[in-house]
Structures are given as C-alpha cells and as structure tokens.
Amino acid sequence: MPPELRGRLAELIRWIDPGPGATHLVSDISGWWRDPAVLASLGPALVTPFQQSRPTVVISPAVTGYLLGPLAATALGIGFVAAHKPGDGRLPPGTLTWAQGPPDYRGRQLDLAVRDRNLEAGDRVLVVDDWVSTGAQVRALYEICAARHATPVGTATVVADCPPEVAAELRIQSLLTGADLTPLTP
C-alpha cells in the first residue's frame, strides 16, 4: 500500500464525542468517501494481499461495506454480494442464508443474511469491511460461506482494531490498525 494512502486514511478520520455517559469516541469515516484519490485507491489497496488467493466474489455487510465491497470487487474484476442486516428494513426477496455472529464491540449479536442465488458452492469469498473490532460480522459471514459450501479466503479491512489472534484466525489484512489512530476515549 502506498504510504501516502495510509497517512491520508488516518488523517481523514474524525472523532466525535457522542455525549454524556459515552465510554468511547465514535469514528466518522465519511472523509474517505469525499477524497477522490483515497476512493480510487481503496479497492486496489484492500485486495492486493488476496490476489494470489483468486477470490471469485466479494461479500460485504451493510452499510459501509456496500461501498467498499464493490470497490474491491471491481479491482479484482469479480462480482459483489451484499450481506443484509434485518434491521435495515430492506431485506431482498427470495431465499436467504442467515447467520448470527458472536457479540460485537457494543455487545450486540448481529444477524446477517446473503441471498442464496448470489453465493454458489465452490465460490472463493473475500470478505471486505471498513472496520473490524471483534470479528463478529466476519465470523457470521464465514458461517454463511460454510452453509453455502463456499470458501472464505480471508478478510480485507481498512482498520483492524481486533486482537492479533483474531486477525490471524480470520486471515484479516488491514490498511491500518487501531494503533495507527488517535485514542478512542472522550
């Protein structure tokens, strides 16, 4: 990854104090989408570590994954599959394969679903997301892959803020780590 991209990604994050009682600041990554050079570089930078794995499809969870996933898929010349969350009110019609991840960084257990017709047995799946803190969503997507007889080749993320053993287990490659960013306390 070009060193200027790494610096620019860290520079464009804004930290927002959600108010009284907050235990951590909330990241605002919208600056990544506003900067055309960053936007053009994200897809290729995310997929570089996985090119030799020859993925056949990229899967990303709602919401920011719907932007990053297609950027990564385009960089690889492959297709994109959206992973839906039941709370977004826009579940697609048709048969879905569901999985529930372990608790996330807020203690919530999130359900994810993929439209069956878009994930085939034998697919080699690259999971792409903006930020991985616990690996909960990644685990749910790997479970969906197993249920559909597809093989996850790993996970590409902009920021990995998870323990090293989680990153190793889930084959996570990131452009930044939590250590590259400002402290997350208000």
Image (tube, grey):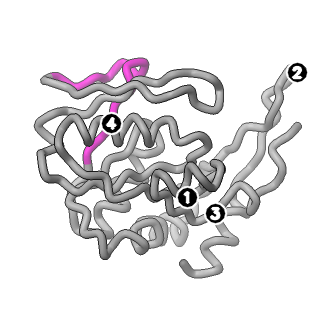
Foreground disc of the pair 2, 1: 1
Which corner quadrant of the image does residue 88 belong to? top left
Using the image, tell me which numbered label, if any, was put on residue 158.
1
Callout 1: SS: strand
Foreground disc of the pair 3, 4: 4
Q: Amino acid at mark 3?
A: Leu
The quadrant of the picture occupied by the C terminus is top right
Circle nearer the N terminus (2, 1) = 2
The quadrant of the picture occupied by the N terminus is bottom right
Residue at image coords 30%, 29%: 113
Circle nearer the N terminus (3, 4) = 4
Label 3 crowd (10 A; few <14 / some 14-19 / many >=20): some
Callout 3: SS: strand
In this rendering, position of residue 54 left or right of residue 129: left
Check whether the beta carbons of the residues at disc 1 and disc 3 lie within 8 A of each other: yes
48 is higher (above) or lower (below) than 39 = below
Q: CA distance from mark 2 to mark 1?
A: 29 Å
Percent position (x, y) of residue 185? Answer: 86, 40
* Total tally of numbered discs in the picture: 4
Callout 4: SS: helix
Q: CA distance from mark 2 to mark 4?
A: 37 Å
Using the image, tell me which numbered label, if any, was put on residue 143.
4
Residue at image coords 55%, 58%: 158
Residue position for label 2 = 20
Using the image, tell me which numbered label, if any, was put on residue 177.
none
Percent position (x, y) of residue 56? Answer: 20, 60
Q: CA distance from mark 3 to mark 4?
A: 25 Å
Using the image, tell me which numbered label, if any, was put on residue 176.
3
Q: Of 111 and 80, which appears nearest the observer? A: 111
First to last magenta residue range: 81-93
Percent position (x, y) of residue 163? Answer: 65, 50
